[in-house]
Amino acid sequence: MSLRDNIEKYVPINEQEEKDQTQMLSFIDSFDDVLTRKNVFGHFSASAFVVNAARDKMVVVYHKILNGWIYPGGHADGIEDLLSVAVREVEEETGLKGKVLDQEIFSIQSLPTPGHEKKGQYISAHNHFDCVYLMEADDSIPLVYREDESKGVKWVPFEEVSDESMVDFMRPIHKKLVKKLQEREHSSF
C-alpha cells in the first residue's frame, strides 16, 4: 500500500489529526519528493510510541535541536515503509528492540522543525509529517543513546508525559498517545 493510501485510510481521532491528515494528503499531492530532506518545505518522518508491558511508561529521548524530551523517531530518508523506519529509529536512538503491537499507523501529526545548524550547515525551518507506530519494549533493559543526536534517553511514567521537560508542542501529542492507548486497552477487555 502506498504512503498516500496509508495516510488516507487512517481514521483521525481528533480535530488536530483531521487537519494534519488533510495537510499531509495535500503535501503528497503537491510534491513529488515527500520522503527525503531534499524537499525544503517538509518531509515524512516515522516515530514510535514505545510503552512498557505494564502500559504505564513510555520511552523518550532528549532531542538536541528541540531542546527537550520527545518520543523516538526520524526521517524517512526515501523509505516509503514508515513502520520499518520507526523500528530502526527506536533501535538506533534507544538501543531497544521494540515489539510492534500494530502494523497500522497509531497517530499522525504535522510537527514544526525550527531552523537550525547541523554538521556546520544551516537547515531552514520545515515540517515533519510524522506517522507514529505503537511498540512495546522491556523497561528493565539498559537504554543507550546516540550522543550526536540526543542528550539522553529514559522511561517516563504516563503522569509525566506533559511536564515542563518535554518539548513544548509535544506535550499535547504525548497526552493524546497515552489517552488513545488507554482507551484502546480498556475497550479490548
Image (cartoon, grey):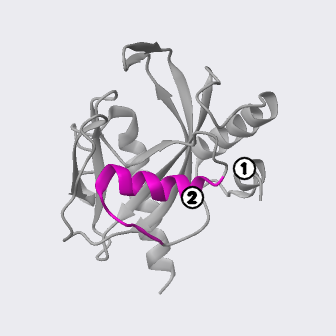
Q: Give the class, few, some or many, for how many residues have Cα within 10 Å of label 1's Cα (few <14, many ≥20).
A: some
Q: Residue 27 occupies which quadrant of the picture?
A: top right
Provide the residue span drawn in magenta: 81-100
Side of 122 where 110 appears, left or right? right
Q: Residue at x 59, y 52 (%)?
A: 82
User: Is 147 one of the magenta-colored residues?
Assistant: no
Q: Which mark is residue 23?
A: none
Q: 55 or 28, which is in the foreground?
A: 28
Q: Residue at x 43, y 51 (%)?
A: 89
Residue 131's place in the image compared with 25, above or below, is below
Q: Position of residue 158 (x, y in %)?
A: 27, 59
Q: Amino acid at mark 1?
A: Leu
User: Is 87 one of the magenta-colored residues?
Assistant: yes
Q: 175 or 141, which is in the foreground?
A: 141
Q: Position of residue 132 (x, y in %)?
A: 51, 53
Q: Spot the residue most to the front.
A: 119
**Could you tell which of marks 1 and 2 lies nearer the N-terminus?**
1
* Numbered disc 2: secondary structure: helix
Q: Which residue is mark 1?
A: 3
Q: Residue 31 occupies which quadrant of the picture?
A: top right
Q: Measure how far apart labels 1 and 2 are at the Cα level.
A: 11 Å
Q: Give the position of the N terminus as an image quadrant.
A: bottom right
Q: Which residue is mark 2?
A: 83
* Numbered disc 1: secondary structure: helix
Q: 87 or 157, which is in the foreground?
A: 87
Q: Residue at x 19, y 71 (%)?
A: 140
Side of 131 where 22 appears, left or right? right
Q: Give the class, few, some or many, for how many residues have Cα within 10 Å of label 2's Cα (few <14, many ≥20).
A: many
Magenta stretch: dominant secondary structure: helix
